[in-house]
Image: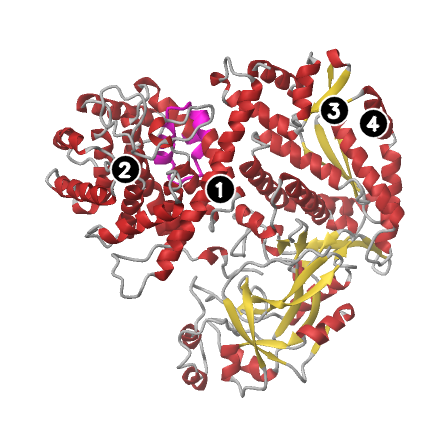
Amino acid sequence: MDSGRARAILKAVEDRQPVDMSPDERRIFVGQGILSPVDTATRDRWLTAVAGLPALRDRVRELSRQALATPGPTAPPELQRMIRELEEIAGQKTSIDSLVWNGPTQEYVKPTLLGRSVLEDLSTWQKHLEGRSFEEVQQDLSTYRGGLIATIQRADLVYRGLMLTEQMRADNDVTFGDPFTTVDLRFASIVLAKRSLDPNLLAGSFEFFNMAVNWGSWNKEDRLVGSTVLASLPGNLNTVRDNFERLRIQLESHGILPEDRIFAAASMADLDPSWWDLVFSRIDEIHRRRPPLNAILLSALARSSYSVDDALARFDAALAGMADRGYRDGLHVEAAASILASAPIERGGMVERFALTAAHLAGVFDPPHAPSAMLAASPLEPFEAIDVFRDCISAITRRNFFELTLEIENLALVMCYGVAPLGLGYLAANLPPGAIPQAPSLVAAVPAYGPSWYAWHTYWVYRPLGRYIATHPVHVHTIAAFG
Amino acid sequence: MVREAVWVPNDTVRLVRLQGDLEAFGDPRFERFWSTHVEGCYVPEILWKLAPRAPGVTVEGVRDDNRSALLPERRWVIGDREFVAAVKGCGAATDAYENVPLTGSRARSICRDRRLVEALAGEDGATSGFITGERWFGNTPYGGQAPDNAAIGLLTSLRAHEGQIAGFYICPVVALVRLPDEYASIASQFYWYRRYSGTYWQEIRLMPSNVRVYFHSPVTFGVDTARAFEMFRIGSFEEAEHFLENMARSSVAALTLYARSLRHDDGRGVYAGLGYHDVWLDKDAVVAPDGTMHFADLEGIEEIPVRDSDGVREEIERQFHRNVYEAFYALEALAIEVDRRWRVLREPSARRTWILETMERACAADPHVAFERRGERLVLGIEPSIDANACGVEIEVASRMGM
């Protein structure tokens, strides 16, 4: 069955309009539990039962009153039977209202909850369904969602490895700054789980960078994002580490302040060294023209696929457009503008896309600007990106891969990078993040900024969250009041 | 099958259980539980050290709210639910005027007896909670419990059969126990401004969980719904729907408590039903692992007398509208989490429809309420336990179903 046809049928059922489903189409929908068939005899029986509902209800209420007045652990068997019957008929009453007549099979159908969900899927991904069969789309979505669950399972294995390492660390092991928390390690695990390597190797890589890089910083977030991004990159560990340290050293001579250097280097860690000179020259140029620009904003623009002129023009256009919509001033608005400006999306639609995602993320992230821009920067349509984000939330919650509720969206934002159904997962992320050094190619069709994404995330989302958690004990809700 | 009680991991509370010659009274139906499991008075360890140290046994509880502790080892089954014992009034964990722990050094700073100040010298870091003599919220000792409040709770609890009052589920009170005088006199030396005058009591109650709706738990259903799902082991949509049925049914019962507990007091010539006084569903009710909302702070539930049937109808409506937002907040939180996990209710209107239809179905057998659809509207008919024709009320629960 064509997926467009499937959508039209389900939409009609949802709108309670008669449908003309062929027996084959019916078989598919009913077989998968998307629609539930009701023959005319059953419907008539329901109607009769519903007509007797008031009398039955009165009888049950009378017996219930008597039972409540009589101390005892359970209701009498007759009352229990009548309650079951009453609940069943109450359900039938609700069902009757949603019945839709299907002429070709001479029966009624009603949508199931699964059916409503399938209709939402078909509506969300409608643009990409042309020429695809319904069965193919269903299979693809199922594989994609199964893949998200599998990613969480892998993340859990990585997490266990990281936890074990953290717990086994000897007192005399020298690390810079505070030890990692479970919240930190779940963030790292989600990023690393995207690589199809043995989870123990991934955990081992993380630990290698954690211990072998000369961080020169007591800031735990520096180590976290650095170790995570480096462990997410393919290649020889020593080479990756050496390149990272060379990047940091070179950034020093391009005006990046010491406190920003690890984040900036991490966001460029996937670049092949042959691209560094070009990116450094852009950093110098942007620095000269916009001296106050934060290093994270700067590195996003410098490594984008746009010339400096274009990148700054896009940045200004994003700022102006956001201001017109009431997003004014502040570093977080600038962060959002730099993410949008550096993304491979059409300049005229940048702010529109941002506004769409921000409407969904307001209250989910505080402030929502950078995360909204990150989703808006995706090659997917904004509502598609939101849908993927929610699928990631679903996978994380169903696998209980969190301790604090406020971790969930944070982890989902990391997880959703590069992920999509129907073969739309974007290249640079579906492969190991940063595996393909497309770097500032002139016509980048896809974003190649996996490390940038993780650096943005850590800087704009994770860091404030981590500080909130660190300063608010778990029993933050317990106050001395009534009770 | 008995559904096990659930509690939120939290700080350990070190208490000393005193038995022997104590003044206590309680619900005779729990006498066996009292005598075999919980009999005694539970004194914060730090307070016990300040007194002549009567023989006692150290007990480790789990902090619940500010002045209570759960005793998870002591459990009791009512119907098909397991409950754990909780002691209310066994010391406050937090300073009354700052959001900081009420440590030994903090207690020293409000102590009015030099000898006790000296005795506390080695207890700077102790955070087991403390019963103070500060007069708080009327006439209650901060960290303890006042006799009148405790008695109100017990009287309400005594009206329950099998843990419910005509479908309204409660956390039953087992017993009230008076803090021995030697401890009360010490506690009365610790206060910030106003000294409490009265006896000090504790309330031993039973709770199916300590997950509250929105406030006063380390995990609350409205804030940490995902954690609550994990704790209650809700692993499928079907389980979530069953949970919703129980939550909806018990919420509607809580919203119609006045009607279902209505009686006519022939002596005074008035109607009287149970009402909420300074207690709310968001902080004073807990959610059991099967979704049934249980009201915990019974000290705020008392009868409200009214003169005639007009007064009854007015009170039924007032009670419903005063509390309905909190109940629906919990139901919405549940539906939102269901959508987050299983993606089956993606539109807000679908969530609302699911909640209302489930509520309608779940309450089908409730003798005190009847949902009726009138066009797009969903109307709740409330029938009090007496004089239903004169005192019945209709309330609009939803103005437009499916929108």
Q: Quadrant of residue B139?
A: bottom right
Left-right relation of B117 to A61: left
Chain assignment, label 3 = A
Chain assignment, label 2 = A
Left-right relation of B152 to A197: right
**Image quarter (top left, top right, bottom left or bottom right) of the C terminus of chain A:** bottom right
Q: CA distance from mark 2 to mark 3?
A: 53 Å
> Circle 2 sits on which residue?
A331
Residue B102 appearing in the image: yes
Q: Which residues are magenta?
A: A358-386
Circle 4 or circle 1, nearest the eye: 1
Amino acid type shown at disc 3: Asp
Amino acid type shown at disc 1: Ile
Q: Is residue B403 magenta?
A: no
Q: CA distance from mark 3 to mark 1?
A: 36 Å
**Image quarter (top left, top right, bottom left or bottom right) of the N terminus of chain A:** top right
Q: Are marks 2 and 4 in contact (CB under 8 Å)?
A: no
> Circle 4 sits on which residue?
A46
Q: Residues within 10 Å of mark 2 (few under 14, many from 20)?
A: some
Q: Residue at x 42, y 52 (%)?
A: A160
Chain assignment, label 1 = A
* Residue A396: mark: 1
Q: Are marks 4 and 1 in contact (CB under 8 Å)?
A: no
Question: Could you tell which of marks 2 and 3 lies nearer the N-terminus?
Answer: 3
Residue at mark 2 shares a chain with residue at mark 4: yes
Element on which disc 1 rests: helix
Question: Could you tell which of marks 4 and 1 lies nearer the N-terminus?
Answer: 4
Nearer to me, B332 or A447: A447
Q: CA distance from mark 2 to mark 4?
A: 62 Å
Q: Residue at x 60, y 83 (%)?
A: B181
